[in-house]
Image: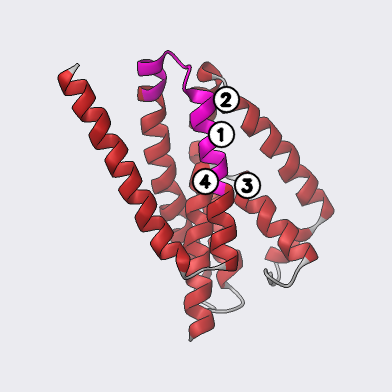
Amino acid sequence: MIEGLSSLASAFGLSASAGLNAYIPMLIVSLLGRFTSLVQLEKPWDALTSWWIIGLLTVLLVVETLADKIPVVDSINDVIQTIVRPTAGAVLFAATTQSAIHIHPVLALACGVIMAGSVHAVKAGARPVLTATTGGTANPLVSTLEDILAIVTSFIAIIFPYLIVIWVLLLALLIYLIARRHRERTATG
């Protein structure tokens, strides 16, 4: 029971992280699955630990990281990632819950799509506003912060899965406060 809840919290955290950057949590899960006992992947998800997949994820991470820093390319990348990020969230959710919970794969995939898709929708919706209000100058900084957030969230989800609930609530509060501050600035200025 405890292991199942831990696995579920981890799956939600990894899926949320995939909504920010699809390849960071995928690569972290792949590497930890290959080199540690922190992540246990059953068939067919153990294919994520293949050197070919790890290499592909590394290349895709570099491409997305660079694309996400350039304002015009960033908008195009977000359109492409509208399919990739929810798919990554679905894979991560299904892969990390299969061994502990054994929930139906369709339900696991749906949970991952919804979680990653929701985070991606917020990110993709906020980014054009950010680009327009700052002339694109804030994009590299915000993109870097999103990448750091994806890394931290992924590791918390794997190492301290119960903390992911608190972490997600703190992030939601932070996003709310930033959005409120932005609305107040827009209304007064």
Reading the image, the residue beneath label 3 is 24
Q: Magenta residues, as a range?
A: 130-150
| Residue 15 visible, this angle | yes
User: Which comes sooner in the sequence, label 4 or label 1?
Assistant: 1
Q: Is residue 139 magenta?
A: yes
- Crowdedness of circle 3 by 10 Å Cα count: few (<14), some, many (20+)? many
Q: Are marks 2 and 1 in contact (CB under 8 Å)?
A: yes
What's the CA distance linking mark 3 and mark 4?
10 Å
User: Which comes sooner in the sequence, label 3 or label 2?
Assistant: 3
- Which residue reaches farthest top? 135
What's the CA distance linking mark 3 and mark 2?
16 Å
> Is disc 4 placed on a helix, strand or loop?
helix
Q: Position of residue 100 (x, y in %)?
A: 57, 79
What's the CA distance linking mark 1 and mark 3?
12 Å
User: Which comes sooner in the sequence, label 4 or label 2?
Assistant: 2
| Residue 84 visible, this angle | no
